[in-house]
Protein backbone atom coordinates (compact mmCIF):
# COMPACT_ATOMS: atom_id res chain seq x y z
CA UNK A 1 0.00 0.00 0.00
CA UNK A 2 1.56 3.27 -1.13
CA UNK A 3 0.37 6.32 0.83
CA UNK A 4 1.35 8.73 -1.93
CA UNK A 5 -0.69 6.72 -4.41
CA UNK A 6 -3.73 6.81 -2.10
CA UNK A 7 -3.30 10.58 -1.80
CA UNK A 8 -3.12 11.02 -5.58
CA UNK A 9 -6.12 8.74 -6.12
CA UNK A 10 -8.17 10.71 -3.59
CA UNK A 11 -7.42 13.99 -5.37
CA UNK A 12 -8.21 12.39 -8.75
CA UNK A 13 -11.50 11.05 -7.34
CA UNK A 14 -12.64 14.56 -6.40
CA UNK A 15 -11.59 15.92 -9.79
CA UNK A 16 -13.07 13.06 -11.83
CA UNK A 17 -16.47 13.35 -10.15
CA UNK A 18 -16.30 17.16 -10.17
CA UNK A 19 -16.74 17.30 -6.41
CA UNK A 20 -15.61 20.43 -4.61
CA UNK A 21 -12.78 19.89 -2.16
CA UNK A 22 -12.20 22.41 0.60
CA UNK A 23 -8.80 23.97 1.16
CA UNK A 24 -8.87 22.66 4.74
CA UNK A 25 -9.33 19.11 3.50
CA UNK A 26 -6.52 19.55 0.98
CA UNK A 27 -4.34 20.76 3.85
CA UNK A 28 -5.36 17.70 5.93
CA UNK A 29 -4.56 15.37 3.03
CA UNK A 30 -1.12 16.89 2.47
CA UNK A 31 -0.31 16.82 6.18
CA UNK A 32 -1.51 13.23 6.65
CA UNK A 33 0.34 12.01 3.55
CA UNK A 34 3.56 13.78 4.54
CA UNK A 35 3.43 12.43 8.10
CA UNK A 36 2.57 8.87 7.06
CA UNK A 37 5.44 8.82 4.55
CA UNK A 38 7.76 10.16 7.25
CA UNK A 39 6.60 7.61 9.85
CA UNK A 40 6.49 4.65 7.45
CA UNK A 41 9.33 5.29 4.98
CA UNK A 42 10.26 1.76 3.85
CA UNK A 43 8.31 -0.87 1.94
CA UNK A 44 8.17 -3.06 5.06
CA UNK A 45 6.74 -0.16 7.06
CA UNK A 46 4.10 0.44 4.40
CA UNK A 47 3.09 -3.22 4.62
CA UNK A 48 2.24 -2.65 8.28
CA UNK A 49 -0.33 -0.10 7.10
CA UNK A 50 -2.13 -2.62 4.87
CA UNK A 51 -4.74 -3.61 7.51
CA UNK A 52 -5.64 0.08 7.84
CA UNK A 53 -5.84 0.87 4.13
CA UNK A 54 -9.66 1.02 4.11
CA UNK A 55 -9.57 3.43 7.05
CA UNK A 56 -6.99 5.66 5.35
CA UNK A 57 -8.90 5.69 2.06
CA UNK A 58 -12.18 6.47 3.83
CA UNK A 59 -10.75 9.41 5.75
CA UNK A 60 -8.95 10.73 2.67
CA UNK A 61 -12.17 10.69 0.62
CA UNK A 62 -14.33 12.24 3.34
CA UNK A 63 -14.29 16.04 3.23
CA UNK A 64 -15.91 17.03 6.53
CA UNK A 65 -15.51 20.78 6.12
CA UNK A 66 -19.13 21.39 4.97
CA UNK A 67 -20.25 20.13 8.40
CA UNK A 68 -18.29 22.77 10.29
CA UNK A 69 -21.25 25.11 10.90
CA UNK A 70 -23.51 22.30 12.11
CA UNK A 71 -20.83 20.90 14.42
CA UNK A 72 -19.96 24.37 15.70
CA UNK A 73 -23.52 24.74 17.06
CA UNK A 74 -22.73 22.07 19.67
CA UNK A 75 -20.10 24.37 21.19
CA UNK A 76 -20.96 27.03 23.72
CA UNK A 77 -20.71 30.53 22.20
CA UNK A 78 -18.59 31.80 25.11
CA UNK A 79 -16.54 28.85 26.37
CA UNK A 80 -14.77 29.08 29.69
CA UNK A 81 -11.41 27.51 30.39
CA UNK A 82 -9.24 26.22 27.61
CA UNK A 83 -10.35 26.90 24.03
CA UNK A 84 -12.32 24.03 22.49
CA UNK A 85 -10.78 21.68 19.96
CA UNK A 86 -11.58 22.01 16.28
CA UNK A 87 -15.00 20.36 15.70
CA UNK A 88 -13.86 18.75 12.44
CA UNK A 89 -10.87 17.14 14.15
CA UNK A 90 -13.05 15.87 16.98
CA UNK A 91 -15.59 14.40 14.55
CA UNK A 92 -12.79 12.85 12.47
CA UNK A 93 -11.36 11.22 15.60
CA UNK A 94 -14.78 9.75 16.43
CA UNK A 95 -15.11 8.42 12.87
CA UNK A 96 -11.60 7.01 13.04
CA UNK A 97 -12.44 5.14 16.26
CA UNK A 98 -15.63 3.72 14.76
CA UNK A 99 -14.16 2.79 11.36
CA UNK A 100 -11.08 1.17 12.89
CA UNK A 101 -13.28 -1.09 15.01
CA UNK A 102 -11.63 0.10 18.18
CA UNK A 103 -13.48 0.42 21.42
CA UNK A 104 -15.46 3.60 21.92
CA UNK A 105 -13.90 4.26 25.29
CA UNK A 106 -12.14 7.60 25.09
CA UNK A 107 -9.61 6.47 27.70
CA UNK A 108 -8.59 3.55 25.47
CA UNK A 109 -8.63 5.80 22.43
CA UNK A 110 -6.19 8.22 24.03
CA UNK A 111 -3.88 5.30 24.89
CA UNK A 112 -4.14 4.12 21.29
CA UNK A 113 -3.46 7.64 20.05
CA UNK A 114 -0.28 7.81 22.14
CA UNK A 115 0.94 4.32 21.28
CA UNK A 116 0.32 4.23 17.52
CA UNK A 117 1.44 7.21 15.43
CA UNK A 118 -0.85 6.12 12.58
CA UNK A 119 -3.95 7.09 14.52
CA UNK A 120 -2.43 10.33 15.77
CA UNK A 121 -1.70 11.28 12.16
CA UNK A 122 -5.15 10.37 10.86
CA UNK A 123 -7.09 11.99 13.67
CA UNK A 124 -5.44 15.37 13.51
Image (cartoon, helix red, strand yellow):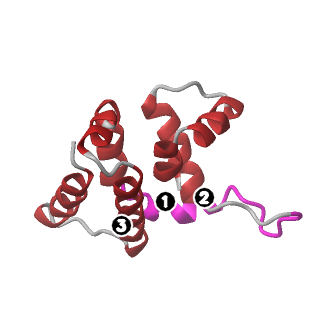
Q: Say which mark, if any, is on residue 67.
A: 1
What kind of element bears circle 3? helix
Left or right: where 89 falls relative to 3: right
Furthest-right residue in view? Answer: 80
User: Where's residue 118, x and y in %?
Assistant: 46, 44
User: Considering depth in this image, is 39 or 85 the residue closer to the camera?
Assistant: 39
Residue extent of the magenta highlight: 62-81
Q: Is residue 54 visible?
A: no
- Name the spot of residue 5 as percent of width and height, x first: 18, 54
- Majority secondary structure of the magenta segment? loop
Residue situated in front as seen by the camera: 20 or 53: 53
Cα distance between the residues tagged 2 and 3: 19 Å
**Is 18 left or right of 105, judged from the image as shown?**
left
Secondary element type, mark 2: helix
Q: Which residue is outermost to the bottom?
A: 23
User: What residue would you read off at disc 2?
Assistant: 87
Relative to the observer, which residue lies in front, 116 or 104? 116
Amino acid sequence: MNVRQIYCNAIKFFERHKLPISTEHKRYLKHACRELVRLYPTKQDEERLAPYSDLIISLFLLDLEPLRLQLQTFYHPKPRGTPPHDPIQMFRSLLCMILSGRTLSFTHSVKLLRSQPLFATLWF
